[in-house]
Image (cartoon, grey):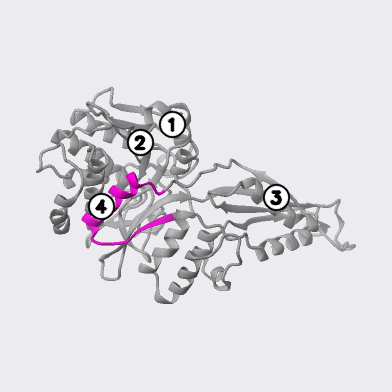
Amino acid sequence: MPPIARLLLPALAFTLAAPAAAEPDEALARRLLNGLVAANTAPSGGNDTRVAVALLEAELRAAGFGDDEINVLGQTELLPNLVVRYRSPNPQARPVLMMAHLDVVEALASDWTYPPFEATEVDGYIYGRGTNDNKAGAAILIANFIALRRAGYQPNRDLIVMLTSDEESTGYSATWLVNEQRALIDAEYALNTDGGSVIEGPDGAPMAFVMQTAEKVYASYTFTASDPGGHSSIPGPNSPISALARALTALEEFHFPLDLGETQRGFFAQWGAVAPPEERPLLASMAAAENGSAAPPELALNPLYNALARTTCVATQLSGGHAENALPQTARAVINCRVLPQESTDDIEAALRALAAPHGVVVEQFGEITPSPPSPLRADVTGPVTTVARAVFGDVPIIPELSTGASDGAYLRRAGIPVYGVGALAERIDDNRAHGQDERISVTAFNDALEYFYLLTRAVSSGE
């Protein structure tokens, strides 16, 4: 346990029902992480989470968890999920759910310095696919359940861990669990290890704790232009490719209006603590901006801030024509939108139709859209998150975050369970290797996140 936490721990406003000497088990957590990284849950491993689940289940049973607490279930044999309930002897509140996922994106061994499906420690870093996203989170949650059970901890509410099998692909498991197995995971709110982080400065010291409270909604559409076609030697004035190009130009020049909720305003107000000085005037103006107003011209030059302040839509795929010497009969583009969680995708589609219609281009939505309302900044969550973060990482700002990507949290938010991404893994802004070559986390970051979640688990389940 870092010295700062030992000094501040007495000030934490919660009662610990376990013996005072109880603390997280770093050796156990590391053993679990090593085993999970070695279990190839990427496509090259068959998209198979059975080995990973079996490893964790064996450790839980050895620690005394029984059949009434462990559930291994899924929609397919290859993709089991693991749900573990730590029961309270006298529940005083609804459960708290804690989340991670066991699947990972692919990694090509030929591209890596170290074997991607083997945890390799070098110079204080642990390399391996999933170390950051998100097997460290799974190892931490299970290791802490076991440490708490061995310490005899008695929470005042049930605690649940949910480890899913397909977050990186379809998200079907989270959808199925929350809709078809709701009793197993129903909770007052969820704490997600697959979101949020601790931002490190150049010297490695923590600068900010980021708490993810909202995610943009993924929505895709097609722009299609059609024509009877003909011989390319006799072109007309407006071929499908030309019409589509004009519609795409109109889309690129269009900006959705500013729409800032409490998470975005909190982010813009506090991100200056870690942002370069030259960006701070823009952050200040965005924190005070009125919804629906014109954006500062420089906003469009900062892709991240622009994506946080409004819905974005961009062309990601193109196809058209059927022969070199024939006029095209069809030209099509895929438009991927990331919609602010407080906005309606119906309104976004209407805006796209209005842009495309003058050019004779038809708009159609395809694929599933999962609305995901933002989670409110409620005091019973932000209070313990802040207290424990400052005990472990020092007097850092707690910054709410709207994620431009997506996680399993979107499906739970849609079903009415607020989700808070508080992964607590420390990293530099310029060295996030999730999904990339030589993915890694530092040993210190892993151990600090382990301690953070251990203390947070007790803080939200102690009754004080």
Q: Is residue 191 magenta?
A: no
The reply to whether the C-beta atoms of the residues labelled 2 and 1 are less than 8 Å apart is yes
Q: Is there any visible trace of residue 166 in the rendered image?
A: yes
Write down the region rendered in magenta: 377-401
Q: Which residue is mark 4?
A: 387
Tell which tag, 4 or 1, sits nearer the viewer. Answer: 4
Q: Amino acid at mark 1?
A: Leu
Label 2: which secondary element: strand
The CA distance from mark 4 to mark 1 is 31 Å
Q: Earlier in the sequence, mark 4 or mark 1?
A: 1
View extreme (top): residue:
68
Q: Is residue 397 magenta?
A: yes
> Label for residue 162?
2
Tell which tag, 1 or 3, sits nearer the viewer. Answer: 3
Tell which tag, 4 or 3, sits nearer the viewer. Answer: 4
> Label for residue 350?
3
Q: Which residue is mark 1?
A: 177
View extreme (bottom): residue:
278
Q: Earlier in the sequence, mark 4 or mark 2?
A: 2
The CA distance from mark 2 to mark 1 is 9 Å
Corner quadrant of residue 114: bottom left
Q: Residues within 10 Å of mark 2 (few under 14, many from 20)?
A: many
Label 4: which secondary element: helix
The CA distance from mark 4 to mark 2 is 24 Å
Tell which tag, 4 or 2, sits nearer the viewer. Answer: 4
Q: Quadrant of the C terminus?
A: top left
Q: Earlier in the sequence, mark 1 or mark 3?
A: 1
